[in-house]
Image (cartoon, helix red, strand yellow):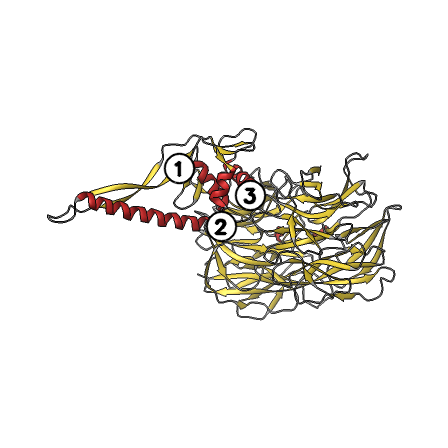
Amino acid sequence: MADVEHQLRLLRFENFEVDLRTGELRKAGVKQKFGGQPFQVLSILLERPGDVVTREELQKRLWPDTFVDVDHNLNTAINKIREVLGDSTESPRFVETLPRRGYRFIGELEPPVLQVVPIVTVEPERGSRSRQTWLKIAAGVLAILVFALAGVLAYRWHRPQRPQEQEALTVIPFTAFSGVATSPAFSPDGSRISFAWNGDPKGGAKGFDLYVKAIGSETLLRLTQLPSEWISAAWSPDGTQIAFHRLAGADSGIYVVPALGGPERKLRPTRIAGETGSIISWSPDGKWIALADALQEGEHIRIYLLSTETLETKPIPISPQCVSEGLPAFSHNGEYLAYWCFRSVAETVLYSLPIAGGQPKMISLFQASPGGLAWSADDKRLIYALSHGSSGELDEVTVADGSTKQLAIAGSASQPTVSSRGDKLAYSSLFTNSDIRRRDLLQPESPAVELIPSSRAQWNAQYSPDGKRITFASLRSGLQGVWISSNDGTNLVQISNPNYESGSPQWSPDGNRIAFDSHPGEHWEIFVADVAERKPRKLITNISDVIRPHWSRDGKWIYFSSNGSGRMGIYRCPASGGDALLLSKDTDAMSPQESFEGKTVYFASHEKKSTLKKVALPGQPGTESEVEGLPRLSNSRLWALSQGGIYFVPADAPRSLRYFDFATKQVRPIFEADRDFGGGLSVSPDGRWILYSLVGKNSDIMLVDHFR
């Protein structure tokens, strides 16, 4: 006979299901991207529905012997719980906060679903142990199994959530040209690859054009003759044409060109800026081209379907949580369109949309920037690229359950493409470097001096208030960190925690401290390090996911941008920590800097092709407005205030440093660089010198044969 003992439960409330055995949360049957400490906190609350669980109890359960910022960790966990459950602080349906006490689960739990494990007991033979003895032994075995399983669950909850890595893949170069070869796309039969390349010396003009090369051949076919800022392409289903998205000022738009060469035809103009945002996809039935664009000036970027027959566009259904969308990819069977939803700079969501009709389905959530998307041949998985600082990796996610695996590919990778048969994978492998330069503003025609030479990328150098030292971001130790040196590049010291990605350093007015952003956990935080002690301390404030700090001129405040959901904008808080005050609700605002007279804060709106804005500080007259007469910036970091104006790099001339005069509202050139500017500009306190970085890029198309 068999006795049954109950094991771990499935807990249900409304349309949610919590599986304590696997550590998973599902909504309407769909697995949510939810784990770690937020799942642990929710599980503890579900143990005692209706009861108050104090903050002290949670601390003892989760961090008994570890020095951590408990308040911050708990607040982050509760916010994540409310986000995934669609709950609110003001009108909670599931999790209620009791100020200064703790939390309790107030939702209505359904009767628990009990997962069972049969324990088979054998009737004792004559002369053997009694039935009660056997039951005690069985119960003891069960207790051991449950205890062991609890240990496994604890490990699941505490271990880092990284994609499982596959066996190493054999990778060979498809291109080996000087310059940047990128944006690969397979022909329908998988025999050819189109790509963008900026290294052709013919004609002398610099920029990307579209090329086609067959696998196993070195013969190169050039399809376009207009060097552009960027090109992304997609083949027609019959292989006779290639659609491409060109970024080239007034010539930006969607085009088609015969795959064997011939005149190109423009289908429609576009306004989008940015390399990865220009990716397009052609539907297998040939009727639609999916693209990301902003139809009206100043609108957020959305995904549209362009009819190849009528050239009309229609938007896809969107999630209200998406600030923008991009990187569309049609499935091989034409039934779905996958794409990325951008909730903030640090949080992206992968969606799948049924083409025949319906709403987008969330596949998985990520805390990184995507760099491409492609379907597997069977349409069961998506291959995608994620960017971590200046490097990228290729992963795959199973569409049905959101489980991920990392592809074992060395080097930085982006923009994957998979052949229709699924036997080949191609991607762009980019190698980027940037070095720090110093130039004399009184003699800008004189050669620049390279400071702090390194084979690793370095940028965002900033002069100290006395001009004797420099702080900058660097990859010289492997992970992006914040460093200090003398103004000639000697006496190098890292000031950020070497275990955390950190950047955007800024000196305090007295030169004794440096504020910078860092990523110690799920979100970006701001830290302040004493230069003498070299020990970073987190800036405690009520706003989460904060980046790009900047000090007020009197040192009393720190300005920053927030990427927190529903809280994006420009803020300031006391330099010693405290509640932050919202200064601008611009959801694209970043990189704030206070004016020299301390009455205004300038900031960039949008990451690339930024508009510079200003907003009056509390108690000062004026409203938020654009800086009249100043052209758009190349990116949000390429500007620096001086007493009389602004040094900046314009969007339409990314290799030119210029100066905007406040008094005359006139712009004059300073010097031309031989490469694009990297992040950050800094003018010395005496106005004599300027620090900047220049970017060097090389990229090849890499090929994985026998991918599946």
Q: Amino acid at mark 2?
A: Ser
**Residue 623 or 701: which is nearer the viewer?**
623
Image check: 216 left or right of 29? right
Q: Earlier in the sequence, mark 2 or mark 3?
A: 3
Question: Which image quadrant is residue 698 in?
Answer: bottom right
In what element is the residue under mark 2?
A: loop
Proximity of marks 1 and 3: CB atoms separated by less than 8 Å: no
| Secondary structure found at label 1 | strand
- Residue 229 position within the rendered picture, expressed as x and y whole percent measured from the top left: 69, 57
Please identify the quarter of the rendering in which residue 412 is found: bottom right
Q: Secondary structure at mark 3?
A: helix
Q: Nearer the viewer, mark 1 or mark 2?
A: 1
Please, which residue is most extreme toward the top here? 91
Amino acid type, label 1: Leu
Spatial CA distance of label 2 from label 3 is: 44 Å
Q: Earlier in the sequence, mark 1 or mark 2?
A: 1
Q: Which mark is residue 11?
A: 1
Badge 3 local density, few (<14 within 10 Å), some, or many (20+)? some
* Amino acid at circle 3: Val
Asked if residue 33 shows in the view, the reply is no
Q: What residue did someone put label 3 on?
A: 70
Check disc 2 and report the residue beneath it.
331
- Residue 110 x/y as whole percent: 38, 32
